[in-house]
Image (tube, grey):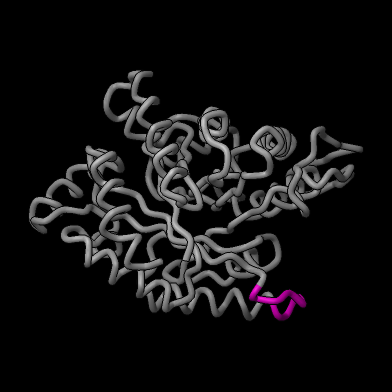
Amino acid sequence: MKFGVLLPTRRIVMEGADPRGFDEVIGLARTAEDAALDSVWVGDSLTAKPRLEPLTALAAIASHTRRVRLGTAVLLAALRHPVHLAHQAATLDFVSGGRLVLGVGVGGAFNEAQRQEWRIAGVDARTRGSRFDEVLEIVSALTRGETVTRAGRHFHLDGAAIAPKSPQTGGVPFLVASHWRANRDSQFQRAARLGSGVISISDYPREYAKALARVDLHARALGRSPDSLERSFYMTVNLGADPSESADEADRFLKMYYGANIWGSRWGPYGPSDLTVQRIRSYQNAGASTMIVRFASFDQQTQLARFLEEVVPHLR
């Protein structure tokens, strides 16, 4: 089991956008690296849930770390032009020594803030699935160092190429968001065809196992070995001795973060650390190889310290 932590690049904006708050983000990344965690991650949103731009933030984090992987959980790839995204991603991967992994998702248009986000980006939200596929195909080819000529539904390119290319074999890797509860087989096909792995956020363990099984089925049909796919899960916790206090803080944090505590029991647990140990084990048994943890707390440093002291040693 590999472990990563989500860095609070949205909380900085939630609490007034004081640039000094980024010092804490750097400190958390360094603590994670010093503790031999595998990765650090940042979220993404353009206008619906404002935060630091993810690739820019990861570039700054890369300059203060040497080993830890740098990931997005998750990047809304269809909001971006693929040549721009490929250039940004390949440059970040180059300057970080091949440490970038892009967790990517199609993204939602379930409320007015999200619909407005697509309109601002000049993207028809109804086409975001097919646009997402094209973006991943183009970014993969460009970051591998290929020259791309294609006439697609969304993008027409004639001899497009970028430099530098990614130092990783195969280009910058993608973990494609796949959720059983979404009940769309297209996402599992995407993960098998375009991804180096899967990332899921809100499935229960049994649902997550079903999602992985469906991705494996499509991978085999494409001649890919399921064993080659990374299997990531992103969970939200609050570690504290008093379950009621932990739940209260998590609820306040998530309501500020999203405007509502949107997933209920699909996130958590909140309370003593042994509950988080048990929950992580349930996802490990379901097939997860990488666990990304977000702390639903206004005290990120204390949460990370508890996680390193009270959770990780029981799972390594």
Give the residue drawn at x 61%, y 77%: 216
Residue 203 image point, x, y percent: 39, 68
239 w.r.t. 211: above or below: above
Left or right? Give the position of 152 relative to 182: right
Q: Quadrant of residue 28?
A: top left
Give the residue drawn at x 46%, y 41%: 42
Q: Is residue 154 visible?
A: yes
Q: Nearer the viewer, residue 294 or 252?
A: 294
97 w.r.t. 38: above or below: above
Residue 38 image point, x, y percent: 50, 53
Left or right? Give the position of 123 relative to 117: right
Check residue 204 for magenta coloring. no
188 w.r.t. 122: above or below: below
Residue 82 image point, x, y percent: 71, 40
Magenta stretch bounds: 220-227
Q: Is residue 113 visible?
A: no
Give the residue drawn at x 37%, y 54%: 293
